Amino acid sequence: GAVVSQHPSRVICKSGTSVKIECRSLDFQATTMFWYRQFPKQSLMLMATSNEGSKATYEQGVEKDKFLINHASLTLSTLTVTSAHPEDSSFYICSARIGTSGGSETQYFGPGTRLLVL
Amino acid sequence: QKEVEQNSGPLSVPEGAIASLNCTYSDRVSQSFFWYRQYSGKSPELIMSIYSNGDKEDGRFTAQLNKASQYVSLLIRDSQPSDSATYLCAVNPNRRGYNKLIFGAGTRLAVHP
């Protein structure tokens, strides 16, 4: 199956700092990647859709200036949590889509990044 | 009404039994359906995808889709303790301008020896 990696897997930072998370599709090209957030014992919450070469599309309630997304290549998308606060502590998971819409498209998830803001 | 609904569980089954996980969706025109497994503290892992009415089998897993009734299910035969996890149902409505997965809240499965 398709492999998606994330880096770092875990990060602890001080309040007010920025944290960058990388998401890479290792064996395929992904024109679209997605960023999710998951709080303990809750379901996945889609934050934004990242499209290669264009601006990300954010879900309602997600601050685009706080969660900066860059999809500079077909294999890399980055999420930067700016001026992180303790309430941003969560499990951030990216996914990459393979295939064509309306047909056999499938999303594969990265292993996730656990962020703890002190 | 939620777009994708699952019973949160936990669903408890004995080892060796068949576990049946169900999911209903609200958008009748949805075309793509997926089951993901998520172990505690890990990210979701794709188990099955299904696009046509009927059954699709892969090893111990069988996905069933009934578009007329708007439900999709996952059967796990010969359940093992290692199958204990949260199972997420995901639907892509494939609506014009909306090509994203909508996830259910997940059903927690507990397989006991």
Image: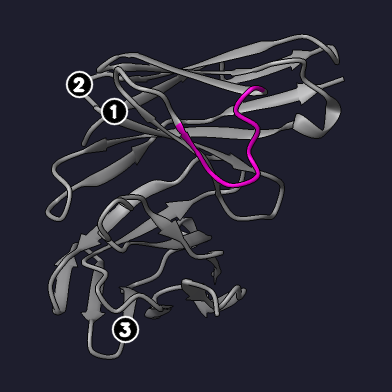
> Please, what secondary structure does the residue beneath circle 3 have?
loop
Question: Which is in the foreground here, disc 3 or disc 1?
Answer: 3
Residue A13 position by quadrant: top right
Q: Position of residue B64 (x, y in %)?
A: 24, 78
Earlier sequence position, callout 2 versus callout 1: 1
> Which residue appears at 27% of the width and 18% of the height?
A26
**Marks 2/3: CA distance?**
34 Å
Instruction: Tell me the crowding category of disc 3: few under 14, some 14 to 19, or many 20 or more residues within 10 angstroms, Cα based.
Output: some
Q: Is residue A99 left or right of residue B45?
A: left
Secondary element type, mark 2: loop
Report the span colored magenta.
A57-65
**Disc 3 chain ID:** B
Badge 2 local density, few (<14 within 10 Å), some, or many (20+)? few
Q: Which residue is mark 3?
A: B70
The residue that disc 1 covers is A3
Label 1: chain letter: A
**Same chain shared by disc 2 and disc 1:** yes
Residue A23 lies in what quarter of the image?
top left
Above or below: residue A114 compared with residue A13: below
Q: Is residue A60 magenta?
A: yes
